[in-house]
Amino acid sequence: MCMVQALGDFNSRTGGHLILWELKLVIEFPPSALILLPSATITHSNIPVGPGEHRPSFTQYTGGGLFRYVDNGFRTERELAEQDPEEYARVCEQKAGRWEMGLRLLSTVDELLESNA
């Protein structure tokens, strides 16, 4: 996961929007706005801000290797393959659909609207 927070002094109606390319979304993203997104599966960028405006970002992420290490029983992939070849084969089979599982963890627009009703 990647956390992006907009900072600075800019008109968020005319610039600084967040673009989520695979979702075909352009979102007004005002100063202090924050989003968590799976940056390995959703390409993101920003629209430039106007002259004299500033829009820095504060960004944090978790490297995929940390998740793999935990999923492998706190072992590297090499250690898992050497110590438990059967489990290593099972983990390798799951990799192809891992991104779909990750996307299912995110809320849908309908779920968000329902929770705020």
Image (spheres, grey):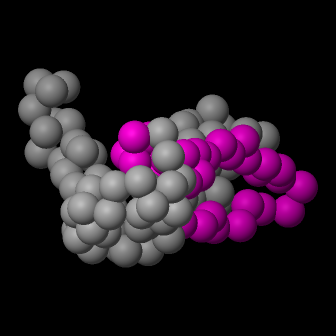
Drawn side of residue 49 relative to residue 26, left or right? right
Q: Residue at x 71, y 67 (%)?
A: 48
Drawn side of residue 73 relative to residue 32, left or right? left
The percent coordinates of residue 40 (x first, y second) are: 48, 65
Q: Residue at x 40, y 40 (%)?
A: 73
Residue located farthest toward the right when viewing the structure as drawn: 52
Q: Residue at x 83, y 52 (%)?
A: 53
**Which quadrant of the view contains residue 58?**
top right
Q: Which residues are magenta?
A: 44-73
Q: Is residue 16 visible?
A: yes
Q: Residue at x 54, y 37 (%)?
A: 34
Q: Is residue 1 visible?
A: no
Depth check, front residue: 18 or 95: 95
Decide whether residue 70 is among the magenta residues. Answer: yes
Decide whether residue 65 is among the magenta residues. Answer: yes
The percent coordinates of residue 2 (x first, y second) are: 54, 48
| Quadrant of the snapshot with the C terminus | top left
Depth check, front residue: 19 or 74: 74
